[in-house]
Image (cartoon, rainbow, N blue to C red):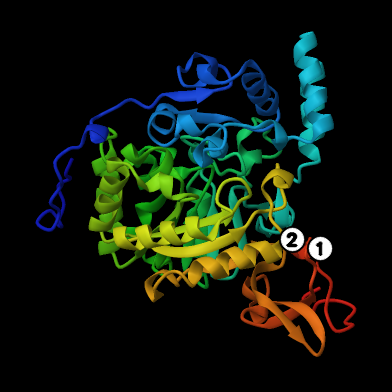
């Protein structure tokens, strides 16, 4: 389980746990989920609902998740079950009935495809102007597979990383997984990435995202990131972030996959080159941290010198309880993970199933933060990744006799907006920035 590196003296692996023994990744999809013994415990109606919803929204999980993370005695209420298995309510009733009717009638594939495309188009597949506003265009060239929304940070979507070990049912990147090339954001070569970065010395951070880039083999990573070590034209790239859910869905990636040690060595080389390497880990519930192998993976990553930061949205029916967040943050800190972002569920996909009013998100965040020590209070939020930038709900207050949301930009398309507070009329039903109105009689927000 160990890897040979310059840090080998400080790296002392624990005995291999049963869950850390080598295992082969086995995907579970809409084609084969009925064969899984645990799934056979579900009712016929529950299994049919999975077929219906997964015709529209992507469904994929694996044996590690099914066998280790889901409490099948608590299904369908179990949070990890809801995180990966589609539920009937994730489609609007009329849409569910339409797809169900097509499946029952065994209609031609063209009818199903047409209905699915219509439903997906209404689900806001690329929120916050991702395709229209974020993809850079310079000198007549479109840099497909890149996003550059904030001055300091470029997002990179390698084509080889546009899937995941499992799909979250709430995922705002769902459009990457539905086999529609017009919806997918991806880059097929490294030359364009390096050329764009070299031409923008103001960029200090690259965020490799997907999908889940940790689905990629290490040799692909070396092609994309290895040049950062040797090319002086890329010295200004100081921070490398990797957005991944693999610590939940496939921690074997860092422990006993065939190239796990190679990946750890690459991370260590990047750290030794002077870079800050951060695993931006998505953890939605404390159940994701309970296996031996995820703890092995966390320790091995940290031994490379990389850091792990955690982020997740508040989700109805999964983690809408401050005690869940407080317990998870305390455990993450104990394991050496830095709590980073508490998000508001984005305005895309099955948002109606998962979204919470902004005031409820703020209450959950406040009640969770006050249960933990300062080491967990590194977390920021509730944060909306909206079109103008990341907007934090700082609180609810009465100002000049008017009840208002107090808001501020954590990041903005215009750097002058950052850290600038502003106010919106209190709305107990609002779930997103575009549902808020300016307070105190103002006609518009300053950033509009």
Q: Residue at x 79, y 38 (%)?
A: 121
Residue situated furthest left in the rendering: 9
Image spot of residue 321 (x, y percent)? 55, 56
Question: At numbered mark 1, what does the secondary structure look like: helix, strand or loop?
Answer: helix
Whether residue 107 is visible to the viewer of this picture, yes or no, is: no
The residue that appears at 49% across and 24% down in the rendered structure is 28
Residue 124, horizontal then vertical, whole percent:
76, 46
Q: Residue furthest front?
A: 73
Q: Residue at x 74, y 61 (%)?
A: 432
Identify the disc placed on residue 296.
none
Q: Give yes or no for contact between labels 2 and 1 (Cβ–Cβ under 8 Å).
A: yes
Res. 112 in view: yes
In terms of depth relative to the viewer, which is nearer, 33 or 211? 33
| Above or below, comparing residue 371 to residue 170 in the picture | below
Up-down: is 311 above or below 378?
above
Residue 2: % across, % down: 16, 44
Q: What secondary structure is found at the residue carrying circle 2? A: loop
Question: Position of 222 compared to 441: left or right?
Answer: left
Mark 2 vs mark 1, CA separation in Å: 6 Å
Find disc 1 in the rendering and name its residue: 435
Camera-side residue of 228 and 259: 259
Relative placement, left or right, of 121 versus 392 is: right
Q: Residues within 10 Å of mark 2 (few under 14, many from 20)?
A: some
């Amino acid at each position: 389980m160990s890897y040979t590196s310059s840090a080998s003296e400080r790296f002392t692996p624990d005995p291999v746990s049963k869950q850390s023994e080598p295992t082969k990744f086995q995907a579970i999809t809409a084609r084969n989920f009925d064969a899984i013994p645990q799934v056979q415990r579900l009712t016929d109606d529950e299994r049919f609902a999975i077929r219906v919803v997964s015709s529209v929204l992507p469904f994929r999980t694996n044996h590690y998740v099914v066998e280790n993370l889901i409490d099948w005695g608590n299904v369908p209420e179990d949070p990890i079950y809801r995180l990966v298995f589609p539920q009937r309510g994730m489609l609007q009733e009329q849409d569910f009935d339409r797809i169900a009717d097509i499946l029952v009638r065994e209609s031609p594939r063209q009818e199903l495809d047409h209905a699915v495309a219509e439903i997906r188009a209404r689900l806001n597949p690329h929120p916050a102007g991702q395709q229209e506003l974020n993809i850079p265009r310079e000198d007549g060239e479109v840099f497909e597979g890149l996003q550059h929304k904030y001055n300091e940070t470029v997002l990179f979507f390698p084509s080889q990383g546009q899937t995941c070990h499992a799909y979250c049912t709430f995922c705002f990147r769902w459009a990457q997984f539905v086999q529609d090339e017009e919806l997918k954001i991806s880059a097929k070569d490294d030359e364009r990435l390096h050329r764009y970065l070299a031409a923008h010395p103001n960029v200090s951070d690259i965020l490799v995202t997907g999908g889940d880039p940790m689905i990629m083999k290490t040799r692909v990573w070396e092609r994309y990131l290895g040049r950062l070590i040797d090319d002086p034209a890329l010295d200004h790239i100081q921070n490398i972030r990797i957005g991944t859910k693999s610590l939940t869905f496939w921690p074997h990636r860092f422990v006993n996959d065939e190239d796990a040690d190679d990946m750890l060595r690459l991370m260590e080389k990047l750290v030794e080159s002077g870079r800050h390497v951060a695993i931006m880990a998505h953890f939605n519930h404390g159940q994701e941290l309970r296996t031996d192998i995820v703890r092995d993976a966390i320790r091995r990553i940290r031994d490379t010198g990389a850091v792990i930061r955690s982020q997740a949205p508040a989700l109805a029916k999964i983690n809408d309880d401050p005690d869940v967040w407080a317990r998870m943050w305390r455990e993450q800190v104990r394991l050496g993970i830095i709590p980073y972002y508490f998000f508001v569920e984005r305005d895309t996909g099955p948002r109606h199933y998962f979204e919470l009013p902004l005031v409820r998100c703020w209450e959950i965040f406040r009640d969770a933060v006050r249960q933990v020590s300062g080491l967990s209070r590194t977390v920021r939020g509730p944060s909306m990744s909206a079109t103008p930038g990341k907007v934090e709900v700082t609180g609810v207050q009465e100002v000049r006799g008017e009840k208002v949301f107090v808001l501020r930009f954590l990041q903005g398309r215009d750097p002058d907006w950052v850290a600038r507070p502003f106010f919106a009329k209190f709305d107990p039903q609002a779930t997103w920035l575009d549902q808020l109105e300016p307070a105190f009689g103002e006609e518009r927000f300053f950033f509009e």
